[in-house]
Image (cartoon, coloured by chain):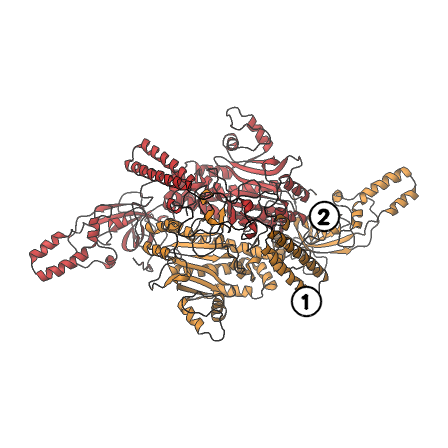
Chain colours: A red, B orange
Amino acid sequence: MESQEPQVKNSPLMPLMYTNRVALKTILESGDGETGLVGTTVVVGGWVKSSKEVKKEPLPPPQSPPPAAADAFPAASHGTKDVTCVEILQSRIPFFRTIIRVLGGSASSPAVRQKLESLIPKPPPPSIFLLDINDGSCVSSLRVVIDSAIVPVSAGQILPTGTCILAQGVLGNPSALGKQTIELTVEKILHVGTVEQDKYPLSRKRLPLDSLRDYPHIRPRTTTVASVARIRNTLDFASHTFFQNRGFLHVQVPIMTTTDPEGFSEKFQVTTLLGETSKKESPIGVSDADGVSPETVKAAIQEKSSLVEQLKRSDSNREALAAAVQDLKKTNELAQQIETREKSKPVTAVKPDLVNFNADFFGRQIYLTVSGRLHLESYACALGHVYSFGPRFRADKTVSAKHVAEMWTVEAEMAFAQLEDAMKCAEDCFKFLCRWILDNCSEDMNFVSKRIDKTVAHRLEYMASSSYDRISYREAVEILSKVTDKAFETQLQWGVPLTDEHLSYLADDHYRRPVIIYDYPKAVKPFYVRLNDDGKTVAAFEMVVPKIGTVIIGSQNEERFDMLNARIKEFDLSKDQYEWYLDLRRHGTVKHSGLSLGFDLMVLLATGLTDVRDVIPFTRTHGKANN
Amino acid sequence: MESQEPQVKNSPLMPLMYTNRVALKTILESGDGETGLVGTTVVVGGWVKSSKEVKKEPLPPPQSPPPAAADAFPAASHGTKDVTCVEILQSRIPFFRTIIRVLGGSASSPAVRQKLESLIPKPPPPSIFLLDINDGSCVSSLRVVIDSAIVPVSAGQILPTGTCILAQGVLGNPSALGKQTIELTVEKILHVGTVEQDKYPLSRKRLPLDSLRDYPHIRPRTTTVASVARIRNTLDFASHTFFQNRGFLHVQVPIMTTTDPEGFSEKFQVTTLLGETSKKESPIGVSDADGVSPETVKAAIQEKSSLVEQLKRSDSNREALAAAVQDLKKTNELAQQIETREKSKPVTAVKPDLVNFNADFFGRQIYLTVSGRLHLESYACALGHVYSFGPRFRADKTVSAKHVAEMWTVEAEMAFAQLEDAMKCAEDCFKFLCRWILDNCSEDMNFVSKRIDKTVAHRLEYMASSSYDRISYREAVEILSKVTDKAFETQLQWGVPLTDEHLSYLADDHYRRPVIIYDYPKAVKPFYVRLNDDGKTVAAFEMVVPKIGTVIIGSQNEERFDMLNARIKEFDLSKDQYEWYLDLRRHGTVKHSGLSLGFDLMVLLATGLTDVRDVIPFTRTHGKANN
């Protein structure tokens, strides 16, 4: 149906820019019926979150021609929510009527006419459709009322969850008791985007978050993921605001890099040597198996089995159980197909030593960046305070709730700044973000507090206003070694990295608020961190937050040429790769410090969620990337 | 030297956050001598842009012990700018004095003492060092005055361009005539980062921008590149501000993707199959040749030859010429080394059909994203107005001033919006950015107007305030076919893409301002653009800007399932890859439109530069990626 999107003249509500609809947020946030919105004509658009149909008494068959929109929307509605054969027949009523008129006209007999009329289905009694639609501008939905006698549309078209609707109507006081404060009575439907109900993942209500991960392209239509997206957006802009307001310049560091900033993380290589396989199918028959790896299928089987078990236990939902069992069966079949194929397949690995990287796009090996801090240093050593905000990559195969292959990171670097400065900056930035979310996302914070974690707003408030302890790694080890009420899996002694359980004990149990740990043993931190005078520790820090773990890491980086050179040798790194980085010490070196903030972890903290796969729009993990 | 960075108490100037120095911007912007800054003690830090030494009358040899900093800075200075043997001897004066004192003490004879004294060089007469230092906070530099009689420091340490200095001193009226309005007399030097003058690329004054491209890590210390970085930062935040203020949510679309949004651009593949070669050297002897490809070396030879030619012509700078010739020789030698090596090398290419991508990290082939618009659609079809700002990649081997392998793009997508809405959004966004730069970057705009392009500010002003024509592709072809005063290389007829010279004619000559061209032939635009009712054209547009070319492209995307499906077949694309994208049409489809703004081109426009390699911090082009 062509949407004409008419200019609505008499609305006190401004339409959104670049569309003629009004954001639901503007209606619902002032929609207490006393703000003069009642009686206003507006255009709204959104997707159906829930719906019901209320039958009216049947009307006499229509004598007058149907209203203007009837060409596009058949003037029929009925009592079930599914599109059925009856409905299809009904949608042809005007056509049948024409036939009858023609036949009846020639036969001229009322009896024949009556007989013919009895052969076609009666138009269903008109209905009132009550739709709650949401457009993503806020948590709440707007109640939209459609009288099928006035606006001809069928239940099958309009009722399914996920249906898109653009409609013009009049705002009014709610017709029924409920939580609504305002509702819209539709005068004209401008667009309907229907749903293939049997294929739509959100047709079953309230899928758990981990099931939603299979539908990253659809899940922002759920209230929770939409709320997460808005909180994420707010934190994103807050991060820029924090640094911009403090005189930092944003620098876009390169994503493809030949320099490895750490020397100990797995990296993704970027190449044009492997070429593209033919478009129609991949070389090893992957296309039949839907392009998935054996690992993915194994993981899927595990997940789906546990869902089946869960549903069996709850036993409340027989349909869902049947569907899940069916789903599991299919996946098992897929696994067998893949196994058969795996056996008859060409050689697997490419030996890197046989590859001529001179022929690659850049004439050498190049990787996706793990951290932008080294490149950022180059700009800090010219412009002072700089920061970067972008994607960082690790080819880590372990599955974790806190780390995936592609994550966004805020990094800052400051010339003429030392370790304490970076720790202060980290604390300020963290508190700023906590406060900003509370001040700028109240509706979404209310929602996540209700739906996900009751204590989340309280915790943000507490963290924004309390002061954090700063302890050295040595002090941390001392505290942990005195712990008697808890046995740690990893026995701690000076020199070994602190594990998640150690960090959790310090932040969740001991301090019960964020804590900053600094001066780490040099072996557990990258080569570029500044060596302390004791020769054993380096000027690195981590900010550990209850429930989340390490959210910010930072360090004062080595500004002394000889020291840095020695560290590069100590780590057995290729000096060639770091010549440009050494240049920054050869020429006009300066003390400088910086930090990296795990942005996705910050979103976890603000939403009360516990797995980054639920807060990253399109998550990338080992064996999983489908779009 | 350890910097103690003392808290400066009596300064009306606030120090920067997370450092004790004051940003030079705050001094220089209020530094007319009448704002009460004279007499204020401040700490400043920065890098030497230019310097000179003024000799004072020789003083009698020091009787009192040197001031506190003398342990770290030898109390010696001399008349040349280079560090010489004399200077090294001089730097040992305290040591010689100790010997003399010891020897003299035991000998007890004034004659012996005098003889010994005559053996060591006399301390040089004290000097005044005048340094202009810059910290990247603004275009201007601060004149810093160091009297070597008061602050013991040597010329060789302090004078070279690029030296880093952190110093405390008192602000005062300028001691000499010149453009300075305020200067700093140093009381105490807190840190000096020296320069290896013979290796420092910026020791030669005013390298042309294309030579600076070889030193991306150093070039932000030049006034021009620093100014570009600040303008770039301002445009960056302005882009976020534009969309945030209009209710758009920022969505971080994935960088690694299995979906190809265009089907006709060269892509980078991401893999873990090729593994890492040993750290010490790459497999094919690349390490000796400094990890560069033959292509890079050839390009370097060409560039350096032309520099030599240029210097020969200008003949003003003999030293520079000698250095350039030496440099060219070295590169030639490198080229020969590489050629020898290339001949004795293992097999080159990897046949993709022999690679088992099931064993790759994601169990399938995956690429760096070319455009985020498809993923953005998924969020637009739930949240309404969304945008993204991130790096996009094309493995295009052609060298161009407007396109490199990694570029940042602003993309927006709007539900319930049509082609005209996206065109309006593009125009608004473009004008907003022009206006923002004029309003928020006046010092840098003055600089680039003076140094790079006199008309740049005027052009921005004109573009921010004029209205743009919108013409269809058909109209564009008509206009171009009537052109008689210019012969185009590519003869134009309906259906072929418009080339750069066509676009340039329209924007630079015909309209003399930005122009929007819409309704392109379907074959020249991606599959996802909405087919118009004529069946021949699609709802795409391009905004073409004088001097730059196409800065924004956009389109209304196909919302009709059957149409989109047909287009995927027409383009011979793998349907599997687009199933998730088709889902957005299967379930609750909506009319939607969006755009992509080439951010780096926007920076060109705002700075008056003509090559994106000069405005991207670390540029990636074919055969070139060294950090």
Asked whether the viewer can see residue A395, the reply is yes
Q: Which mark is residue B570?
A: none
Callout 1 secondary element: helix
Q: Can you identify the residue that label 1 sits on?
A: B313
Task: Of the two numbered discs 1 and 2 on the same chain, state the one appearing first in sequence.
Answer: 2
Amino acid identity at mark 2: Glu
Residue B333 image point, x, y percent: 67, 55
Residue A487 image point, x, y percent: 51, 25
State whether residue B166 is above or below residue B613. Answer: above
Question: Decide: marks 1, 2 in contact (CB < 8 A)?
Answer: no
Residue A615 image point, x, y percent: 43, 43
Q: In the figure, is residue B531 to the left or right of A86?
A: right
Asked whether the viewer can see residue A443, the reply is no
Chain identifier of the residue bearing label 1 in the image? B
- A598 and B437: which is toward the camera: A598
Tell me the residue at 41%/71% (across/down). B478
Label 2 CA crowd tier, 10 Å (few <14, some 14–19, many 20+):
some
Residue B167 image point, x, y percent: 69, 48
Location of residue B533 (image quadrant): bottom left
Amino acid identity at mark 1: Arg
Label 1 CA crowd tier, 10 Å (few <14, some 14–19, many 20+):
few
Callout 2 secondary element: strand
- B279 and B322: which is toward the camera: B279
Q: In the figure, is residue B360 to the left or right of A168?
A: right
Q: Which mark is residue B187?
A: 2
Tally of numbered tags? 2
